[in-house]
Image (cartoon, rainbow, N blue to C red):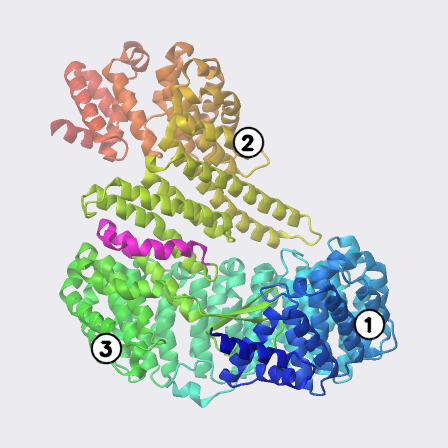
Amino acid sequence: MDSESSQFQQAQIASILGPDLAPFETLVSHLMSTANDQRSQAESLFNLCKETRPDALSMKLAHLLQSSPHLEVRAMAAILLRKQLTRDDSYIWPRLSPSTQSVLKSQLLVCVQREDVKTITKKLCDTVSELASGILPDNQWPELLPFMFQSVTSDSPRLQESALLIFAQLSQYIGEILVPHLNTLHSVFLQCLSSSASADVRIAALGAAINFIQCLSSPAERDRFQDLLPPMMQTLTEALNCGQEATAQEALELLIELAGTEPKFLRRQLVDVVGSMLQIAEAESLEEGTRHLAIEFVITLAEARERAPGMMRKLPQFISRLFAILMKMLLHIEDDPAWHAADSEDEDAGETSNYSVGQECLDRLAISLGGNTIVPVASELLPVYLAAPEWQKHHAALIALAQIAEGCSKVMIKNLEQVVNMVLNSFQDPHPRVRWAAINAVGQLSTDLGPDLQVQYHQRVLPALASAMDDFQNPRVQAHAASAVLNFSENCTPDILTPYLDGIVSKLLVLLQNGKQMVQEGALTALASVADSSQEHFQKYYDAVMPYLKAILINANDKSNRMLRAKAMECISLVGMAVGKDKFRADAKQVMEVLMSLQGSQMEADDPTISYMLQAWARLCKCLGQDFLPYMSVVMPPLLQSAQLKPDVTITSADSDADIDESDDESIETITLGDKRIGIKTSVLEEKATACNMLCCYADELKEGFYPWIDQVAPTLVPLLKFYFHEEVRKAAVSAMPELLRSAKLAVEKGQAQGRNEAYVKQLSDYIIPALVEALHKEPETEICASMLDALNECMQISGALLDEAQVKCIVEEIKQVITASSTRKRERAERVKAEDFDDEEGELLKEENEQEEEVFDQVGDCLGTLIKTFKASFLPFFDELMSYITPMLGKDKTSEERRIAICIFDDVAEQCREAAVKYYDTYLPFLLDACNDESPDVRQAAAYGIGVCAEFGLSFFKPLVGEALSRLNVVIRDPNALHSDNVMAYDNAVSALGKICQFHRDSIDASQVVPAWLSCLPIKGDLIEAKIVHEQLCSMVERSDRELLGPNNQNLSKIVAVFAEVLCVGKDLATEQTASRMINLLRQLQQTLPPATLASTFSSLQPQQQLALQSILLS
C-alpha cells in the first residue's frame, strides 16, 4: 500500500473515532447496508479501527449504545460489541487498557438499566453474558452478580427480565459460577414464576430456571427445584388462558428442552405434566403450532431413552390418548385434484401440516416405545377407523399402520395374519387414495416385516399388487403398486419371486408404454428390482425387456424426462448384472456409447442423471469385469470430481434472526453445535457418498486393473475417513482402504505396476494404516468403529511383514483404547438397567446396542489374530501389554462373545508362537478347561480347539493336565445333544483335541480305552477344517497299523472301513484329495489281505448307498 492511501486511511480512522459521533454512526449504518460494496468497504474500515485503536472503537460502540436515538444503530452497536467480546478470532478484551475495560463494564450495566426497547435489551443481555462468560470465572467483574441479584429483586419488570435473561445464558456458559448461589436462585426463580404480574418476566424465569437445572450435576441439587415445576407449568397455562399463544409457544420450547436433557426431573410430577400437555394437544381452538409443540414435548419424553429408560411406558392411559390425537391429525387431508391428475411427483397433494406432524410423530412414538406398548393401542383404534364410513379414516388407519411398522416390527411379525388382512382388504376400497395408502402400507411392511411377510404371504400380496397395476383410471395407484413391487422383492429370494415373474414382467412392460411419466418411472424401478432379486432367472425376459429400456435411454432427452432416463440407466445396469456378461454383451457396447456421450455433455448441477450414471457405470463394471477397463478413462475424472466435492456449508450464530437461507428447502439439513447453527446441503453430500462408494466398487472389481488410479484415489479418500458431515462417506472411505492396498499389491506381484516394486506397497500401507488408526481413535459411531477395525485387519493381512514396529505399537495402543471405550459404554448401559422404570422393552434395545459392541470386540480379536499370525513370537512383548485388557474378558461376568474372543486370541498365541507361548499356559489353561462347561457352544468350541493346540505344542508343560483335559473334553463329547446343529462345532473340536492327546501324549493315557473312544466319534462332519485334519490323522494311524486303533484281532477294522466309506461318499468336504486317495489305497489293500468273510461282514454293516459308492470307488 502506498503512503498516500495509507495517510488517507489514517485520516478516515481519525475522523471516525474523533469527538464527533456522526462519522462513526455513518460507519455503523454502512455495516448494515444491503449494497455489497458499501458494506465491505465499511467492514474493512471497521477492522482497521479494531486493529489500530481497539480502545477508542470500544468506547465509541458503548457511547452509541447509550446515546444514539436510532433504534437500529443501537441494536447494531450491541451486536458489534458482542462480537468483539466473544472469545474467538475477533476477541479484543485482552488488548483493551484497564481503564477502558472498567468503563465498558459499568456502561454496559448502565445501558441494561436504561434501555427500554425490548429487542435491544435482549441484544444487550447477550453482550453482557458473552463478556461475563470470559471474565467472571477469573473474578474480573465482581460488580455483575450483585447487580443481577439487585435487578431481579427490584420493582422493575424490565430489569427483572434482563437479569433473568443473563442468568439463563450464564447457566449455559459458566453454570459452575452460579452453583454456590443455588439457594438464592431457587427463591428468586420461585418468586418470579409465582408472583410476577409480567408474562415476560415469568417466561424469562422459566428459561433461567430450566438452564440452571440443566447445569446442575447431581440429582439431589436438581431435586431442590422440584417445587418450581407447578409454577413453571402455570406460566404455560396462564399464557394460554390469556390468549398469548406466542408466549405459550416460547414456554413450550423451553420445556421441550428440559424434557430432552433432564426427563427424570419431571418424573415425580409426570402424570400432571403430561396430562396438561395432552389437554393442549387436544384443544382444537388453539393454534396448530401450539398443539404441535405440546405433542413434541410428550414425544421428546418418550425418546429420552438413555436418560429415563422406560419412564413413559408406565403411562399407558396417556399413550392411547396421544395415539388417538395423532390419528385424528391424519384426518386433515383434502382430496386434491392434483393428486388424481398424477402429472407430477406431488404425492402429498392435499396433505396439511397437521397430517405431516401426525405421520412423523407416529413413527417416532413407535420407535421410542416399541411394539409391546403401541400394538395393543393400535389394534383397538385401527379397526374402528377402518369400519367408519369416511374414506379419510380408512386412509389414516393404513398410513398409521405403515408409520408404526418399523418400531413395532417384532410384535407385528407375531400378528402378521391380522396385519395382512387389514391391508389387503383395503385394496378393494372405492376411494383411490385409500387404495394408494394400502399399497403404501404393503411397501413399508415389506421393508419392516421382511422377509417373514414375503415368505408367508407372497401368494396373497404379489397377485394383489399385480391387479393394482391394472388400475388405468388412477395412474398414481398404478405407479405406487410398481414401487411396492420393489420393496417386496428387495427382501425376497429368487425361489419366491420366480413363479410370479411372467405375470409381473408383462404388466410392467405394459406400464412402461403408459403416457404418464410417473407410471413409467415406477415400472422401471420395479423391473430393476425384480431383475436384481431374480438374478439369472431374469434371462428369459431379457430379449423382451431390453429394447424398451434402450429406447427410453436413447429417446428421453428433454429436461422433463431426465428422471425417466436416469431410471432407465439404473434398470439397464441392474438387468445386465442379473443376466451376466454373456447375455448382456451384445447390448453393452451400445449402452456404454450412450452413457459416454451423456458423460461428455453439459448437465445442470441438479440433474439426477449424474448420480444415477455414477452407479450405472459401477454396475456395468461389475457385470463386464476386466472388459470394462477401456472405459475407465472416461468414467474416472468426473467420479473423482464428485468424490472431491466440498460440503456446501453455511454457518450462522444459533440465535441469529437470519435463518439459513432455504431452511425450508428439503435439501438443507441444519444442526446446532454450541452457539453455531450449521446448514449443510444434503444433495451434495449424497453425490459425494455415491461417488466414494463407486470408487470402492471399481477397486474391488478390477483389482490390479485399478492400479493406474490409486495415486489419485488414495489422497481423495484417506482424508474422508474423518468426514463427520456424512456417515455414508466415511463408511465408503473405510471400505475402500483394503481394496486400494490389495490392488497395489496385486499390480506389483503381476508386474503391472509400471516398474514399481514392493516399496510402493509399503509407501501406500504407511499412508493408509496410520490414517485408519487415527480415524478409529476419533470415530463417534460404534458401527463404523467395527467397520474400521475390519478394514484395518484386512489392510494388515495385505501388508503383512511390511508393517514396522512403530505402526504395530500404534495399532496396539489404539486397540487398548477401543477395548476401554467399549467397556465404558457397556458400563453406562448397565447403569441404565438400574433406572426405576427399566423394563423388558428397554432390555431388548440394550441387547441390540450391546450386540453392536460385540461386533467391535470380534474385530479386535481378528486384528490381534492377524498380528500374531504375521509376527509370531516377536509380537509377544505387545501381547504382554495387552494381557491386562484381554484377561478380564474371560470373567464369568462378561458376555459369552467376549469370553470366546479372549480364548480365540490365546488360541492364536499358542498355535503361532508354540514353545514361546508356554509361559502363558498357567494363566490361560485353567480358563480353557473351565470353559469346556460354558453354556455357550461357541465358547466350548474355542476352548476345545485351544486344548488341542496346547496338547500339540505344550508337550511337557501340558503333560500334568492330560487327565483333567480328558475329563473336560469327555463332557463335551458325551453331552446327549452334542450332535445338535448348535453344538456340533464344539463336539468336532473336542474330538480333534482328543485325537491330538492320543497323538502327542499316548504315554500319559490309557490308550486301549481312549483311542477306540476317539475312533467311535468319527467321522466328524461339522467343522470342515478340523474334519480334514482328523481324517488325515486316522489315515496315518491305519497306515502304520496303530495297535490300539485296530484293537485286539483287528476288531475295529469294520468301524475304520465305515468311517472311510462315509468320508469318501461325502466328496471333497471331509478330506483333502490326498487323504482321500490314501484312504482308497488302504481300502484296496484291505480288500486283498482280509479274508472274504470278514470283508463281507464289514461291508454288510454299511448303509446301502455307502456300499454302492464304495464298490464303484474300489472298482474305478
Q: Which residue is mark 1?
A: 193
- Closer-to-camera residue (137/878): 137
Q: Quadrant of residue 311?
A: bottom right
Whole-number angstrom distance, CA of label 1 to CA of label 2? 55 Å
Give the magenta range.
698-723
Marks 3 and 2 close (CB-CB < 8 Å): no
Q: Name the disc covering residue 884, or none.
A: 2
Q: Where does the image place residue 681, in percent across and percent down from the top left? A: 45, 71
> Could you tell me which quadrant the C terminus lies in?
top left
Upstream in sequence: badge 1 or badge 3: 1
Horizontally, is 231 left or right of 65 in the view? right
Whole-number angstrom distance, CA of label 1 to CA of label 3? 68 Å
Q: Name the disc covering residue 592, or none.
A: none
Q: Where does the image place residue 698, in percent across and percent down from the top left? A: 27, 56
Horizontally, is 87 left or right of 458 in the view? right
Type of residue at label 3?
Answer: Ile
Judged from this view, the residue extending furthest toward the left is 1116
Mark nearer the viewer, 1 or 3: 1
Upstream in sequence: badge 3 or badge 2: 3
Q: Where does the image place residue 257, in percent across and percent down from the top left? A: 67, 66
- Closer-to-camera residue (595/1018): 595
